[in-house]
Amino acid sequence: MTPHVCRLLSAIALAVPAAAQSFLDLTEVRNPANPYFSVFEIEAGAIGVQPTDEDEGSGLESGISWDGHVYWRDDSFSARRGTLEAYAGRDGLYGGFYDGKIVGDDTVTRLEVRARPWQFYRDGFYRGGAFVPNGLYEGRDYEGYLGFGRDAQGLYIELGPYYRQNDFARGDRTPNSFTIPEDYAAYGGRLYLEQSSVQMDRRRGMPRDGFVLTLLGEREWNDSQGEIGTAGFLTELPSAVWRMRGRLEWYVPSSDDMTWEIFARGGYCDEKDRVVNYDSTHPLGNLWGDAQLRLRIHLGSSWTVTPFAHGQYSRLLDEFGRSADKKFFVGGGVESYLHLSEAFSLHGFYSFLDNESRPSIRVDEDVHGEHMFYLGLVMRFGGQRR
């Protein structure tokens, strides 16, 4: 390969953003720092897991599965020039449309449909460092949301109603003694507060400085009936609950080639909100936190390596269901992107966390463990940069 071609490929790769979308990115953050006006993105790869101690009854098994997503964004959709986004991945399905002209007066109208067809719930407790399940079961939910938002001197405020249908099913690991929740519908109101000061590195198309802080509050009512749990610990879902969640992305430049990243999420729910509290996509419990301290390092123009430290906090009921049990978990890992061209990038990561309850790597079975690793190919087409 000639030096001229090498320089050309390096310049192209330098302009390729190294972050992919996820279901949480689209549903938790209202106005994320996105380097694209429009893009069609496909990521496909293999994800694996290795538990420290295998336990088939708890889903702690070694395994490899597929992973990936499809994402499309258009900031000039239709004659109204609104923004349309669509996403499909192992973590969920999403479709959204928003613009500031439907209502007018600088009000953003946002219409969203969401679905999580492959959910796993782990009702249980920790005994020492081991997670002991009362009952593992499966579920899916479908939601529609209509929001109205405005920017008030740098603080974005959005409020709107939502409706969600929750369905549940027994799995291969659900014991006969465990009563799963009955299907139920839920509706309520959702309030977002978000502040952002992110500055983009236009050469690399990635955040370089600033933060995005999102706070979310929900008031929900439901028509649930029946009890959940085992004979020694049966409870009913409350007919109305409050929930709060928060998310922080904070970027602090260290040098031209290194940027500190702080990613944190957390949630607080009613202790009796037994379904949401045992959702395996986040740390278990009614009060939880999940944070990473990362150092993004650019090695040349086409390779990014990001080592990180990882910590979690979980507060959930003990094995007798009478008092709160507080747990801390620590770990770390490394994530990397290698840009092969403007359209193709390799993406991989390895992470370890000493929490036996980590997200499942499969959609048909709850398989998880403390060690996780992934390798995939990211393909972007028709991207128009800001």
Image: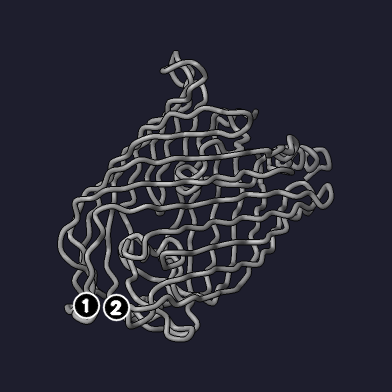
- Where does residue 342 sit, x and y in percent of width and height? 65, 38
Q: Residue at x 55, y 68 (%)?
A: 312
Up the image or down, 283 lies above or below 95; here it is: below
Front in this rendered view, residue 318 or 358? 318
- Where does residue 105 sit, x and y in percent of width and height? 49, 16
Q: Counting other residues with Cα less than 10 Å from the Cα at mark 2, is it few (<14), some (14-19), or many (20 or more)?
A: some
- Locate residue 332 relative to residue 40 in the image: left or right: right
Q: Residue at x 78, y 54 (%)?
A: 299
- Locate residue 224 relative to residue 32 in the image: left or right: left
Q: Residue at x 38, y 75 (%)?
A: 317
Q: Amino acid at mark 1?
A: Thr
Which quarter of the figure is the C terminus placed in? top right
Q: Amino acid at mark 2?
A: Asn
Determine whether the residue tagged by mark 1 lies in a helix, strand or loop.
strand
- Where does residue 287 sit, x and y in percent of width and height? 46, 64
Q: In which quadrant of the rendered view does residue 67 lie?
A: bottom left
First in sequence, mark 2 or 1: give its number. 2
Q: Residue tagged by mark 1?
A: 230
- Locate residue 172 relative to residue 277 in the image: left or right: left
Q: Are marks 2 and 1 in contact (CB under 8 Å)?
A: yes
- Where does residue 80 sit, x and y in percent of width and height? 45, 15
Up the image or down, 375 lies above or below 115; here it is: below
Q: Counting other residues with Cα less than 10 Å from the Cα at mark 1, is it few (<14), some (14-19), or many (20 or more)?
A: some
Badge number at residue 32 = none
Badge number at residue 134 = 2
Q: In which quadrant of the rendered view does residue 56 lie?
A: bottom left
Which quarter of the figure is the N terminus placed in? top right
Front in this rendered view, residue 346 or 355? 355
Q: Residue at x 49, y 32 (%)?
A: 73
Front in this rendered view, residue 344 or 311? 311
